[in-house]
């Protein structure tokens, strides 16, 4: 999960703040893919390492969905009513 200790977050936050101008899905996908490739750069292309890289991104997507997308869907259902 993306919940690391606050003192370690600062190591990454300054660099990631530079990316605040990402303004579309394609740019975001590019940045995520590039970050995954950077992560894998000096690691062996073994199943476990590749799986860990993909799994980390999937965990982040799952957590983002849980916190934001699901909440938005619940709000829309409350406003518009459930599907009958």
Image: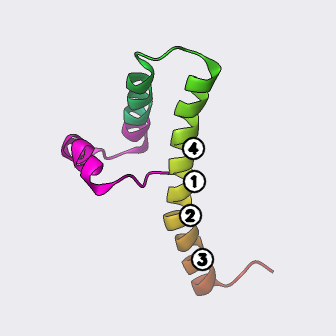
User: Which of the numbered marks, if any, corresponds to residue 26?
Assistant: none
Residue at the (50%, 66%) spot, across then down: 67
Task: Report how far apart the C-alphas of labels 2 and 1 lie in the structure.
Answer: 6 Å
Residue 62's mark?
A: 1
Numbered circle sitting on residue 66? 2
Pointer 1 with pointer 4, Cβ within 8 A: yes
* Residue at the spot 71% in from the left edge and 81% down from the top edge: 82
Q: Does label 3 or label 2 sit earlier along the sequence?
A: 2
Residue located beneath label 3 in the image: 74
Quadrant, the C terminus: bottom right
Mostly what secondary structure, the magenta segment? helix
Q: Is residue 7 within the magenta segment? A: yes
Classify residue 5 by image quadrant. bottom left
Q: Kindly report the distance in space between the C-alpha atoms of the residues bearing marks 4 and 3.
A: 22 Å
Q: Position of residue 12 (x, y in %)?
A: 26, 43
What residue would you read off at disc 4?
A: 58
Q: Which is more foreground, mark 4 or mark 3?
A: 4
Residue 19 lies left or right of residue 49; in this view the side is left
Q: Is residue 20 above or below residue 37?
A: below
């Amino acid at each position: 999960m993306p919940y690391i200790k606050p003192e370690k977050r600062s190591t990454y936050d300054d660099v990631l703040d530079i990316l605040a101008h990402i303004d579309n899905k394609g740019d975001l996908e590019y940045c995520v893919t590039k970050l995954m490739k950077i992560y894998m750069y000096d690691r062996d292309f073994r199943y476990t390492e590749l799986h860990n890289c993909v799994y980390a991104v999937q965990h982040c997507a799952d957590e983002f969905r849980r916190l934001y997308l699901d909440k938005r869907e619940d709000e829309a259902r409350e406003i518009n009513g459930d599907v009958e």
